[in-house]
Image (tube, rainbow, N blue to C red):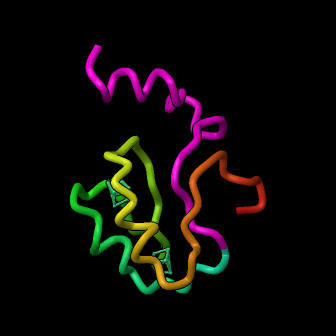
């Protein structure tokens, strides 16, 4: 089993509400640095906000560059 198949199975991406993933908190000001920094294009830009829709390389470049500390990893809280 290759890495991505393993990750998809592990993270249950067929049910996104239960899948651990990157997400932006309300501290996000829409600067778009994370979107521009991602080397693989995994970040989508939807309604002026970043969205992580698929498993990625987990390089952390997006969360490292975020000036607001708005990028978290885990189960997305319902209010987010
Ligand atoms: S962790 Fe890396 S590959 Fe994944 S979304 Fe962030 S910048 Fe892109
Ligand atoms: S880098 Fe941080 S503040 Fe800027 S768009 Fe991404 S999550 Fe929002």
Q: Quadrant of residue 33?
A: bottom left
Ligand 1: quadrant of the figure: bottom left
User: Quick check: is 3 in the magenta stretch?
Assistant: yes
Q: Quadrant of residue 38?
A: bottom left
**Image-based side of 39 in relation to 68, left or right:** left
Q: What is the tally of numbered marks visible in this picture?
A: 0
**Residue depicted at x 76% and y 53%:** 78
User: Which part of the image, by quadrant, shows the C terminus?
Assistant: bottom right
**Residue depicted at x 39% and y 68%:** 45
**Residue depicted at x 54% and y 27%:** 12
Q: Is residue 4 above or below residue 17?
A: above
User: Quick check: is 73 in the magenta stretch?
Assistant: no
Q: Is residue 46 among the parts visible in the rendering?
A: no
Looking at this rendering, what residue extends furthest in the left direction? 39
Q: Nearer the viewer, residue 44 or 39?
A: 39
Q: Quadrant of residue 68?
A: bottom right
Q: Nearer the viewer, residue 11 or 50?
A: 11
Q: Is residue 59 among the parts visible in the rendering?
A: yes
Q: Is residue 1 above or below residue 49?
A: above
Magenta stretch, residue numbers: 1-25
**Residue depicted at x 64% and y 80%:** 27
User: Which part of the image, by quadrant, shows the N terminus?
Assistant: top left
Q: Position of residue 35 (x, y in %)?
A: 34, 71
Q: Position of residue 79 (x, y in %)?
A: 77, 61
């Amino acid at each position: 089993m290759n890495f991505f198949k393993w990750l998809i199975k592990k993270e249950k991406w067929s049910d996104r509400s239960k899948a651990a993933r990157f997400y932006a908190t309300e501290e996000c000001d829409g600067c778009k640095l994370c979107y521009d920094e991602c080397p693989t294009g995994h970040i989508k830009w939807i309604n002026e906000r970043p969205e992580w829709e698929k498993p990625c390389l987990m390089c952390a470049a997006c969360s490292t560059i975020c000036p607001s500390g708005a990028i978290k990893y885990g189960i997305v809280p319902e209010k987010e």
